[in-house]
Image: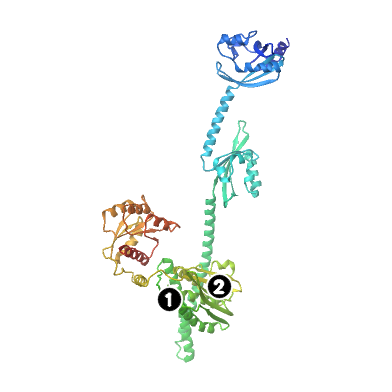
């Protein structure tokens, strides 16, 4: 038979178990049974009916004899026997406990050859690989870092959930894309080179780049790429892990800016210190030199008077410099007081104008001083001395840097504010210097020839501090050779009554408690820093109330419960264990309305609002001056009693 020749020639060479069978068909031509015609293995190795000689036996007979049940794919082979072609099946042999990949085909009408390939080991390996893959993907998806796997050409074959979330795309959209498509074009060449070199270097490498995300600002991504090797030690894939390092990059940039600013400030400070040395030595030389000349008995009276005037002017110049240095020191240490009183702004502006007109006429006869004020009287509550200092510094600056033209001073009402201005037609300020004019130790002419424009570089810094102490802000608009316009604002009204204003001024001047403060008041100071606690205790030595100290939140709660005589609490926000805000909430939950003043050295935006939401009545930032602390305590004690 043809099938026998085929079997003898081909099937004996197959490494897999094979068997041949012929279909028995009914009148309709449908296969109803099979007769096995041959096999290339011993019957004991056949997974169908082991230990049974199957040649020349019918399939139905073997099924009935063995009790192993029918073999599904043999039934389906009838179609192949009748119509030809081939089919593929997977079949698990219960008796052999193995999985086979079965291929059946018909070399001749009604004849079928079946090849059984044992894939049990492959199945086990696939299961292990699938388990490993699932574990890897589960682990990767639990990570906050971006994780991906890519081919050598950077085609993405896996991305985790963090990757999808970061770039705003699904895994379906990302898989198959090139990683380079998600990296700035300027970095393509470098990254492609580094990835290609992995097979040679065989070492991981790091890489960072910017990424613009839709609807967000620029982000910085830092990658670490690691090669994945196959069993032949060839590069099979590349594993990438990335994290968002935007905060780190911004912090680094901020440190660089801070360093540059510090260096710039140091340069300005060095220049100003050298200038102050000059400023002090110059008038001192005049004073000592002309004092020496005055010893000469033969000097003429007119010349003597001239020398005395020079000594007097030099003394005033040095006194102004010393006053500026003292003001800066007070501002830095928080010891500069504000003394509010009722001011008629029109009167103050006219007085300043009348004071400076003779000075302009004497020093700069080609410069005219003009005053522009509203017709109606405007009265506000502010500090007269500081307002005069602000205007004096601005007018002196305008006079110093203006050689011809005019200087205009005035103010106008803008909503809840009064906007003051001093404009000049002087030398102006370069754009790169304009943003620094209010910095301490800065002078716009530092990098240029000084000429007659001498000064300590402290005036505008003091001016800015005074404006802010009065509740306003200051800014400048200027162009070189076109002049400068300095603006500052003050609140139109200060929300301080006349009685309370007098009281506060008196308290700040004396540093003592007002007569209205109950002498039996007890203050609970909650402070974990022993130096701060000691400082507050020193503050309180000449105040007529007792201060009790608690170093932790738990101790504060115990003392509050056990000392009903406590009238006010100074609460540090950051405490070990229970925070100051938590302590405040617990006290409020007890139903107590005792005044609680939050204090913090952090001065972080939002801390004040958090303190008020927790139940605090007031808030102060450390460091705090003695007078400011006293005023805050007094204000809250009075408010609680009323």
Label 2: which secondary element: strand
For the N terminus, which image quadrant? top right
Residue at mark 2 to residue at mark 1: CA–CA distance: 24 Å
Residue closest to the eye, 105 or 536? 105
Q: Position of residue 637 (x, y in %)?
A: 32, 63
The residue sitting at the front extreme is: 28
Left or right placement of residue 324 versus residue 125 in this view? left
Colour basis: rainbow
Q: Position of residue 169 (x, y in %)?
A: 59, 43
Label 1: which secondary element: strand
Quick check: 25 above or below 389?
Answer: above
Residue denoted by label 2: 485
Q: Does the rendering let one see residue 12?
A: no
Q: Does the rendering let one see residue 540?
A: yes
Residue at image point 57% right, 73% down: 484
Q: Which mark is residue 343?
A: 1
Residue closest to the eye, 555 or 530? 555
Q: Position of residue 308 (x, y in %)?
A: 46, 86
Q: Quadrant of residue 621?
A: bottom left
Quick check: 438 above or below 255?
Answer: below
Q: Residues within 10 Å of mark 2 (few under 14, many from 20)?
A: many
Q: Position of residue 87 (x, y in %)?
A: 66, 21
Q: Earlier in the sequence, mark 2 or mark 1?
A: 1
Quick check: 548 above or below 358?
Answer: above
Residue closest to the eye, 270 or 434? 434
Quick check: 169 above or below 380?
Answer: above
Residue at image point 68% right, 20% down: 86
Left or right placement of residue 57 versus residue 625 in this view? right
Left or right placement of residue 75 versus residue 547 in this view? right
Q: Residues within 10 Å of mark 1 (few under 14, many from 20)?
A: some
């Amino acid at each position: 038979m043809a099938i026998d020749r085929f079997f003898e020639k081909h099937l004996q060479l197959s490494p897999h178990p094979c068997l041949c069978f012929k279909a028995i068909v009914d009148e309709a031509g449908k296969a109803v049974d099979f007769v096995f015609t041959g096999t290339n293995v011993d019957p004991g190795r056949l997974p169908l009916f082991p230990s049974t000689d199957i040649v020349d036996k019918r399939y139905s007979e073997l099924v009935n004899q063995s009790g192993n049940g029918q073999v599904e794919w043999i039934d389906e082979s009838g179609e192949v026997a009748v119509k030809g072609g081939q089919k593929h099946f997977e079949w698990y042999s219960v008796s052999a406990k193995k999985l086979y990949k079965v291929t059946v085909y018909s070399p001749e009408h009604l004849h079928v050859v079946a090849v059984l390939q044992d894939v049990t080991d492959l199945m086990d390996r696939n299961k292990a690989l699938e388990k490993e893959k699932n574990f890897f993907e589960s682990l990767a998806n639990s990570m906050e870092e971006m994780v991906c796997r890519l081919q050598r050409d950077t085609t993405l074959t896996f991305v985790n959930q963090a990757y999808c979330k970061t770039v705003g795309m699904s895994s379906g959209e990302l898989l198959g894309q090139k990683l380079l498509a998600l990296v700035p074009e300027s970095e393509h060449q470098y990254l492609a080179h580094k990835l290609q070199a992995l097979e040679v270097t065989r070492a991981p490498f790091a890489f960072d780049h910017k990424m613009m995300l839709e609807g967000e600002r620029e982000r910085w991504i830092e990658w670490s790429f690691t090669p994945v090797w196959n069993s032949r030690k060839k590069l099979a894939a590349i594993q990438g892990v990335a994290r968002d390092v935007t905060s780190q990059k911004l912090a680094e940039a901020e440190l660089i800016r801070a360093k540059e600013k510090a260096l710039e400030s140091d340069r300005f400070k060095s220049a100003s210190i050298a200038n102050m040395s000059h400023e002090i030595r110059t008038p001192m030389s005049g004073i000592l030199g002309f004092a020496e000349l005055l010893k000469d008995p033969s000097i003429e009276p007119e010349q003597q008077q001239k020398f005395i005037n020079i000594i007097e002017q030099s003394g005033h110049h040095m006194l102004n410099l010393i006053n500026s240095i003292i003001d800066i020191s007070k501002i830095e240490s928080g010891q500069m007081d504000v003394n509010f009183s009722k001011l008629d702004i029109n009167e103050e502006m006219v007085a300043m104008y009348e004071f400076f007109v003779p000075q302009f006429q004497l020093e700069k006869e080609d410069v005219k001083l003009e005053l522009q004020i509203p017709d109606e009287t405007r009265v506000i509550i502010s500090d007269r001395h500081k307002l005069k200092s602000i205007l004096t510094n601005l007018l002196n600056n305008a006079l110093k840097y203006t050689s011809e033209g005019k200087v205009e001073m005035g103010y106008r009402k803008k909503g809840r504010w009064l906007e003051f201005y001093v404009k000049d037609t002087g030398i102006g300020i370069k754009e790169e210097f304009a943003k620094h004019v209010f910095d301490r130790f800065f002078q716009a002419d530092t990098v240029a020839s000084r000429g007659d424009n001498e000064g300590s570089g402290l005036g505008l810094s003091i001016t800015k501090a005074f404006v802010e102490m009065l509740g306003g802000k200051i800014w400048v608009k200027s162009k070189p050779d076109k002049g400068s316009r300095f603006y500052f604002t003050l609140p139109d009204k200060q929300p301080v009554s006349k009685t309370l204003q007098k009281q506060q001024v008196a308290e700040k001047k004396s540093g003592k408690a007002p007569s209205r403060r109950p002498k039996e008041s007890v203050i609970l100071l909650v402070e974990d820093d022993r130096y701060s606690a000691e400082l507050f205790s020193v503050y309180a030595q000449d105040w007529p109330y007792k201060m009790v100290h608690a170093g932790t939140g738990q101790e504060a709660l115990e003392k509050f419960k056990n000392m009903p005589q406590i009238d006010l609490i100074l609460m540090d926000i950051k405490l070990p264990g229970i925070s100051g805000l938590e302590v405040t909430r617990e006290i409020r939950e007890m139903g107590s309305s005792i005044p609680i003043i939050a204090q913090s050295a952090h001065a972080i935006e939002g801390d004040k609002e958090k303190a008020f939401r927790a139940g605090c009545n007031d808030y102060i930032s450390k460091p705090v001056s003695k007078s400011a602390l006293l005023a805050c305590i007094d204000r809250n004690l009075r408010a609680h009693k009323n």
